[in-house]
Each structure stands twice: as structure tokens, then as C-alpha cells.
Image: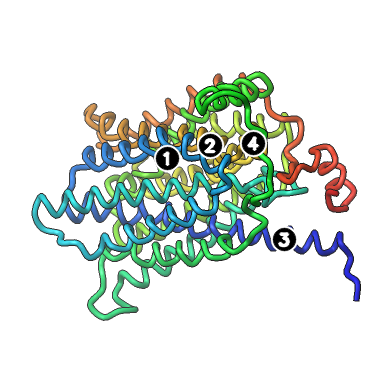
Amino acid sequence: MQTDPATDARAAGKRTRLAWYAYDLGNTSVEFAVPLFLTVWIVTDLGVDAWVFGLATAISSWAIGLSGPFIGVHADETHTRRRWFISSASLAAILFASLSFFPRSGTAALVTILVVAMAANYFFQLSSLIYNASMLSAACGANVVSVSSLGMGLSFVGGLAGIGIIEFVVEGHVIPGVSGRGYAIVPAALLFVACTIPSVFTANLWQKKTDAVALPPGNLSQRMRTLWRESSREYRAGWFLAGYFMLNSSIMGLTLYLPLHVEEVTGLRGMDLLMVFATVVITSAIGAGAVALMRPTGAMVKRIILTGSILLSVNAILFSLVSSLPLVAACSCLHGLFSGALVPTVRGAFAQTFHSDYQALAFGLFGAVQRVSQGLGAALWPLASTLGADSATGAGIAAMAVLALIGVPLFSRWRPADSMIACADGVDTAQAAAGEQTGSPAP
């Protein structure tokens, strides 16, 4: 019995995207588990100073920022993205899961926990960097920003379920005697591993040995400069990354310490604090889902980024001033809504900046900006909080608002691609766009 090649292609595309979405789910579960459980455990329960934790997080982020582009170009040119992904994801899961079983008393024990946590953070971020290089493969024939946003929106919902599972474990309902935030990262690591399995065995997400890579002339540094000049000339990528540096510093710095701020200002703890954070996750999913439904292209993508950055900043300023529970909860939810819309939009927009065969390099540079800027947010927060504001964390929130505002004029210089529809297998963008508009698959 003969099958319709077009139908088979659509089915294969759906399976590929589902596998790609699965990793987003596991990634987001860990991303939310870190500020909600790991940060609070290390800073509040173990007594590590907030500035020490912030500096350690910054160093870990800067390390991936410095090494990511070089690892990315190596993975592109040697067809080893999947190998790098499997290794980094496995190491991240093992290191995160081991944290709960280290001794917890004494300076040496605290230093060990902090070092292992930062090493786990490095490999976790590396797996994300390599994985994002498969975005064009996952979005073949579809709107890249929409696919990026839908994946992140679904992952926020899944991440919320993951947080529920983690809370169930740390309350001692699963394993007798195992309770407390110190064990929270174990189920997060296990969920992360489970979510990486579909992508590992989905061949369409990864390079084939027969795929040709159009190597620019020169050594590694010269090749990277050539590719960068091309993207800068066509898209003004430098302005994009400069704007993203400031925006991501704001988003990640605020998100990293949001639970601590809410706890300090409102006094909420335990399940009450968890419910506030869960609402933030839901609003993040709503923000990402709204962008996915819009299927934005070109100028619309730029408007979303500029408008969202301004709204994010205004909300952060209000967040730093209010103290009543309803207003704090409202500002927290608005932060989730705006950041949930902005992060996948920016991620999807950058996917078309470089050649499809150099996507790991593209996201190595993107990840460098993402993680170095995250380090700025992590380091700037404790510095800002020493300025003597009424709330020790209020000045940090206000500092994140300033960073987001600085990003607006930088993003305004960026030139977006006319279309956000792409295929990593050599299909012309215009052909893919025509296929989406007519409802038929890209050739």
C-alpha cells in the first residue's frame, strides 16, 4: 500500500517538533527549580551569603559564555551536536542529582555544594545551547518564532507540573525520611533526563554525516569573523545581541531572585510562596502561547520585542515599590507574562541569523550573550541590594528595570529577517512560506 509522501512528511515533522518540545519541558522544570528550590536552599537553609551565590552563578554563566561559541563551531563542523548534547545533559543531571547527598555542615561542605552546583549549571546551559541549534530542523516549513514560543509555552505548563512533582517529593510523601528543599533538585534532574530521551533518538533533529558544511576560508577565528560579518551586514546582529544582553540580564536577574523578594516583602513561605510562583509560571505560558498564535514575522517580531521590553521595565519599577500581597502577586504575574512572551520570541528570531549549517555557532554566540548577561543580573542584584533601600531586594528589582530600558534603543537598530519561516535542510525560505500560506508542506 502506497503512502502519500506529503502526509508522511507532515507526520515526521510533527514527531520531530514533539521531541523538540519535550526537551523544553525538562529544561524549564530545572530552570524553575533552581530559583524556587536550589537558590532558597543554598542561601536560606544552608546560610550561604546571597552575594557569594550570585557571584558563583555569574562565574558559571560567564564560563559557558566564553566557551560556548567555540564548542558550537566545533560541533557544527564535525557533525557532533548530538554527541555534545548527550554528554552535557547527562553530566548536568548527574551533578544536580548528587547535590542532595553531600555533607551539609562546615565550610568545606558548603564550598563543595556550591562548586558542584555551578558545574551542573555549566553543563545544563551547554546542553541548552547545543539543543537550540536544532530549532530550524524542528521548525522545517513552519514559523520559527511560533515554534519557539509554542515549545516554551508548553514547557511552562509542563514545568509547573514538574514543580508540583518536586513539591510532592520534598514534603516527604514519596520516600519516607526524604523531605526538605535539599532533595528538590533530584526529581528535577530525573525529569530532565526523561525529557531528553525523545530528542536523543529523533534523527531529524541532528546533523547527518553526509551533510555538507560550507566552510569559510581561514582558521577558526577567521571563519567565525567571516560568519559574523555576514550576519551583521544583513541583520545588524550586533545590535540585536547588545539589546538581548540587557534584556536577558533584566529577566534572568529578576527571575533568579523573585522568590527571595516575594518572601522578604510579603513573608510568604512554603506552599503559599509556591502558589505565587506557580501563577507566574502559568502567566509565562500564556505570554508564550499568545506569541505562538500570532505567528509573527519581520517587523511584528521587532514590535513585540520593543513593546515587551518597555512593559517589562515599567512593571519591574512598580514591583520594586509595592509591598502589599495583591500588588506583589500582580507584578509577579505580569513579569511572567512579559518574559514568557519575550524569551521565545528572541530565541526564534535569532535562529535565522546564521547559515543553517552553523546553528550551533549561532546559538553559541547567542548563549554567550545569554549566559554572560545572566551573570550580570546575578552579580548586579546583591550589589544593588546594598544601597540601603527600604527593601533589601527592592533596589535589585529597580536595577533590573533599568537594564531592560537600556535594551530598547539597542534593539531598535536591529534589522529582522523578512520571514520567520525556515527549513534547515536547504528548503528556500520563500518556498517554505508559500507552503505554509497554502496549507501545503514545504517541498
What residue is drawn where x is 29% and y is 58%?
A: 269
Q: Which residue is mark 1?
A: 252
Q: Which residue is mark 4?
A: 349
The answer to the question of whether label 3 and label 2 lie on touching residues, with beta carbons closer than 8 A, is no
Question: Sequence order check: which comes first, mark 1 or mark 4?
Answer: 1
Question: Sequence order check: which comes first, mark 2 or mark 1?
Answer: 2
Question: Sequence order check: which comes first, mark 3 or mark 2?
Answer: 3
Return the x and y of residue 300 as percentages of the image width and height. 71, 33
Question: Sequence order check: which comes first, mark 3 or mark 4?
Answer: 3
Q: Nearer the viewer, mark 4 or mark 2?
A: 2
Q: Which residue is mark 2?
A: 73
State the CA–CA distance, disc 1 to disc 3.
Answer: 31 Å
State the CA–CA distance, disc 2 to disc 1.
Answer: 26 Å
Name the element at disc 1. Answer: helix
The answer to the question of whether label 3 and label 4 lie on touching residues, with beta carbons closer than 8 A, is no
Observer-nearest of 141 and 437: 141
Q: Nearer the viewer, mark 1 or mark 4?
A: 4
Type of amino acid at the residue the image marks with label 2:
Val
- Quadrant containing the N terminus is bottom right
Type of amino acid at the residue the image marks with label 3:
Lys
Depicted 127 relative to depicted 182: above or below: above
Tell me which corner region of the image, top left, top right, bottom left or bottom right, holds residue 357: top right
Name the element at disc 3. Answer: helix
Q: Which residue is mark 3?
A: 14
Tell me which corner region of the image, top left, top right, bottom left or bottom right, holds residue 395: top left
Q: Nearer the viewer, mark 3 or mark 2?
A: 2
